[in-house]
Image: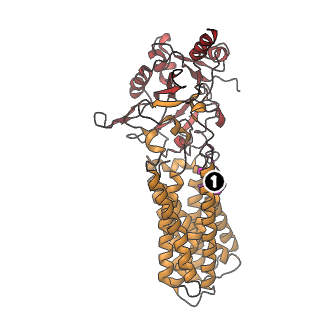
Chain colours: A red, B orange
Amino acid sequence: MSTNKQLALVIDLNVCVGCHACVTSCKEWNTSGSAGPLTDLNAYGASPSGTFFNRVQTYEAGSFPNTQTVHFPKSCLHCEEPPCVPVCPTGASYKRKEDGIVLVDYDKCIGCSYCSWACPYGARELDEERQVMTKCTLCVDRIYSETLPESERKPACVLACPTSARIFGDVHDPESDASKAIAERGGYALMPEWETQPANHYLPRSIMETIDAARNAK
Amino acid sequence: MRPQFSIIFFTTLVGMAQGLLFFVALLNIEGPVLSAPFLSMLVLPVSFILLTLSLVASFFHLGHPERAWRAAMMWRTSWLSREVIALPAVMALTAITFFCVIIGIVPTWVWAALLISILALWICTAKIYQCIRFIQEWSHPSTLSNFILLGLSSGGLLLELLLLLWNQPDIPLGISLISGVNFILLFLALNLKLWIWRRNQKLKPKSNLASATGIKGNNIRQTSMGFMGGSFNTREFFHHQTDRVISNIRKIILLMAYVGPMILLAFSMNSPNIVQIAIALSMHYIGLLAERWMFFAEANHPQNLYYQRVS
């Protein structure tokens, strides 16, 4: 692991309630920010579709009555070994050395979609109207902003989350809240089998272990 | 994956041109076998037209074709970028060969360079797919072998058709011999395809919902992908056809790309005629379009794990 900065999100699955506030705040900020517009197709029709950098999905696990519902926010994981970057033929897709954010240069992108094929997580979406590849920027135009108050220099999704399920920080700095959360609460990466080393981590739900422990104690 | 028609036409047309040029270069590298008028008036112009058509087809894949020149930049890391360099190289060498034929002498190095550029283009094209390690259907050397074998078979059939069209006594080659070679190529390609299909069937996906979400517990299932109207993720990575359509297209591929042309070749082995070979090539090409469609359709992308249920 390099000693450079690697900004990332740590998502706490214990407290995410699936409200989609991060989805809408992401869309709101980014459609009017430097990454935008995130266009919508057929927005008021029968089958609306549009570009989003962040989605909240829902999963169930277990068998009745021991089931759990897990709300699962999903965005670009800003991999340390991003498979989407070397395949880009134009160099539009790149990983920043200074903070590890994976970005797309929209002026260089030829819209070939190859990077999206090379991402196992489906984190990239081709904007149908602009015909360029888009993805989570970790709100790169917010976090370094000099016009926003210091407390707001965080990704829009982090600020919007009502349950503080999203922790933003440098996962290479062992003293950051993000690193501490990963270390203390068993933070894990998605699809470790492809060795992409995602920077974003997820904190596993501990509620089922608590319930099991309570049942066993009876 | 969603079959991309621009790429289906690109890979089949360029493969046919490569196969044709490969045979021509191989035959002539030791000294002229095919006559100069046959090369300058038929083979090389036809190859160049096929290469141009494939190049045009590839542009339809791009959201911003006017920026296509940028795609040559990242040749150090990207097979797509290398392909973007290799295709014009093949076109340039085809043009150089054409002018050499017109002048009257084709140096050995020109044929050798043409051969090498053709092989390089095959490797680049196949590696674009083969290098995506988590699309397990593609990530195997059989992707390259399949592209080369089908390029050779379609190019060989085209060469046979052009020889019959030319119909001049200045061709020393036995046309039956070419029929035989084409038959063997189709037989090998058929066996490879059947082997690839068996391999794909037996593949065990390395990713599953447990590794994709990290949720602990058994019987993980999605209850909502987070939106209802579809997105790039629901459109780009799946063929959207029923199992029945897929199995019918498999039958069409076997019949049109392989078995049909092989029967026609077998019947015409002793005295090939132009109609039979023209039908064989047309069938083979239509079969190749279906084969390339299936190449995309049967590739399973792990991102689909995240998009299984609308709500």
Q: Is residue B130 magenta?
A: yes
**Residue A199 shown left or right of residue B54 in the figure:** right
**Residue A121 shown left or right of residue A33 in the figure:** right
State the residue at coordinates (67%, 64%): B116
**Image vertical order of residue A74 relative to residue B308, above or below:** above
The chain identifier of the residue carrying mark 1 reads B
Q: Position of residue A158 (x, y in %)?
A: 49, 17
**Image vertical order of residue A169 relative to residue B310, above or below:** above
Q: Which residue is mark 1?
A: B199
Q: Report the residue that reaches farthest toward the front.
A: A218
Q: Report the residue that reaches farthest toward the bottom.
A: B169
**Label 1 residue SS:** helix
Residue stretch rendered in magenta on the structure: B124-142
Q: Is residue A118 magenta?
A: no
Q: Position of residue A86 (x, y in %)?
A: 61, 41
Of A101 and B157, the residue lying toward us: B157
**Image vertical order of residue B122 relative to residue B241, above or below:** below
Q: Amino acid at mark 1?
A: Arg
Q: Within the image, what quadrant is residue B34 found in?
A: bottom right
* Residue A137 visible within the image: no
State the residue at coordinates (61%, 35%): A82
Of B86 and A44, the residue lying toward us: A44
* Residue B150 visible within the image: yes
Of A7 and A165, the residue lying toward us: A165
Q: Specify the quadrant that holds the C terminus of chain B.
A: top left
Q: Position of residue B171 (x, y in %)?
A: 60, 86
Few, some or many residues within 10 Å of mark 1 (<14, 14–19, 20+): few
**Residue B147 shown left or right of residue A143 in the figure:** right
Of A101 and A165, the residue lying toward us: A165
